[in-house]
Amino acid sequence: MPSPSAPARYWVSFADKAGVKFNPATYFSPAAQARRQRQGLPAYEASDLPVRPDYLARVRAGSDTLTLSSRWFNAAACRATPTQAAALRQLPGVVRVVRWPEAAAPAALAARPATTPPLGRRYEVSANR
């Protein structure tokens, strides 16, 4: 079992995307732009905007590792100690910091039978074709 002070994975959610610069013409392919227009969708939505760079810089500086960011969830994943996670919670623009559970070890696979069971009467005809 890991030490309580060992780094763990955390999900950091942010408050907003205010001030983010975004140009849909350079982000979306011409085909995607045409599809959005055909479907009557706006040129872009808030979920298309990137995470604020200043928020990511603060998480990067306040954690062991920034592992990814999600524009859809307006959040970032990082590895941090519990002390660092507590400090991340106090950062401007941070709404929530949640520890991700570590991946569980996979369950043992059931042993395969030594022989294949018979197909049964209803499948014998198709199996012999």
Image (cartoon, rainbow, N blue to C red):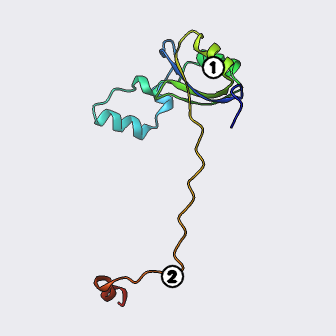
* Residue nearest the observer in this picture, 76 or 89: 89
Q: Nearer the viewer, mark 2 or mark 1?
A: 2
Question: At 57% from the left edge and 58% from the top edge, which residue is drawn?
Answer: 108
* Residue nearest the observer in this picture, 46 or 41: 46
Within 10 Å of disc 1 (Cα), the crowding (few <14, some 14-19, many 20+) is: many
Question: At 52% from the left edge and 25% from the top edge, which residue is drawn?
Answer: 75
> Which residue position is annotated with label 2?
115
Mark 1: which secondary structure? helix
The percent coordinates of residue 71 (x first, y second) are: 50, 27
Q: Amino acid at mark 2?
A: Thr
The percent coordinates of residue 102 (x first, y second) are: 60, 38
Question: At 27% from the left edge and 31% from the top edge, which residue is drawn?
Answer: 40
Q: Amino acid at mark 1?
A: Ala
Question: Which corner quadrant of the image does residue 94 belong to?
Answer: top right
Tell me if 57 is positioned left or right of 109 in this view.
right
Quadrant into which the C terminus falls: bottom left
> Which residue position is annotated with label 1?
85
| Mark 2 to mark 1 CA distance (whole Å) | 53 Å
The percent coordinates of residue 27 (x first, y second) are: 50, 31
Q: Which mark is residue 24?
A: none
Mark 2: which secondary structure? loop
The percent coordinates of residue 8 (x first, y second) are: 65, 30
